[in-house]
Amino acid sequence: MVTIAWGITGCGHFLEENLALIRKLPRVDVFLSRAAVEVMKIYKFDPEQLHGPGVRLYREGAYSAPVIGRFYNGYYKVLIIAPATSNSVAKFVAGISDTLVTNLFAHAGKCRVPIIVLPSDQEEEVTSPGPRGMVQLFPRPIDLENTARLKSFPGVIVVSGMEELEKCLDAYL
């Protein structure tokens, strides 16, 4: 059975939809950045509710994450990072791997494990759920540029929404 690695960053955009999709998967290891845990609590999602049959949960802790070594022995067939903040996307593009999720991205890339990313900032104007209702957001030009640059990375698929993410994911199930 295929095991999926799934990284979640501190992003509210698409958060609820991603959590619902994770709960449907037969076998997934979920990696939460510190910011993801904070944002999930703000949005009234308990990270522990992700635990269930086939779901293992890893939180950012020490400076190294030995579990990332699983990429080197072929344990994971795909890495999904969804939702991905503009900060995480900027780090992916710049080659900075100083968090659990940016380390996942770096090591999956080094092992040529396919990576699917759902960035929060893809359009000049976005309507997104906030903790108290819908909000209008206007991503900065640099954030849109970083998303565009990420699309050129070999082995990385940047998806624009949940439907596209699910379609890409189907290829690995």
Image: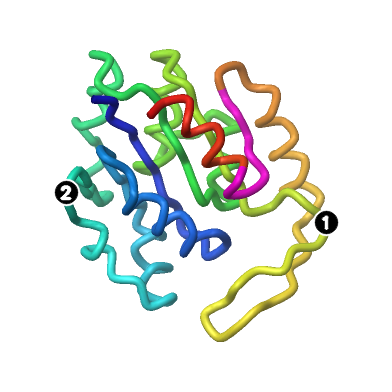
Dot 2: few (<14), some (14–19), or many (≥20) neighbours within 10 Å?
few
Q: Which residue is mark 2?
A: 53
Point out residue 142 in the picture as x, y percentages from the top left corner.
76, 46
From the viewer's perspective, is 141 left or right of 135?
A: right
Decide which of 125, 20 is in the foreground and name it: 20
Q: Disc 1 or disc 2, which is closer to the eye? A: 2
Point out residue 37 in the picture as x, y percentages from the top left corner.
34, 63
Point out residue 98 in the picture as x, y percentages from the top left corner.
40, 39
Decide which of 80, 64 is in the foreground and name it: 80
Q: Residue at x 72, y 31 (%)?
A: 149
- Number of numbered discs on residues: 2
Q: What is the secondary structure assignment of the residue under circle 1?
A: loop
Magenta region, residue range: 156-163
Q: Is residue 124 magenta?
A: no
Point out residue 108 in the picture as x, y percentages from the top left corner.
40, 23
Q: Residue at x 55, y 18 (%)?
A: 155
Q: Which residue is mark 1?
A: 124
Instruction: Give the amino acid type for the residue marked by disc 1 in the picture.
Output: Glu
Dot 1: few (<14), some (14–19), or many (≥20) neighbours within 10 Å?
few
Instruction: Give the amino acid type for the residue marked by disc 2 in the picture.
Output: Pro
Question: Does the rendering let one see residue 90?
Answer: no
**As drawn, 152 above or below 128:** above
**As drawn, 23 above or below 69:** below
**As drawn, 23 above or below 137:** above
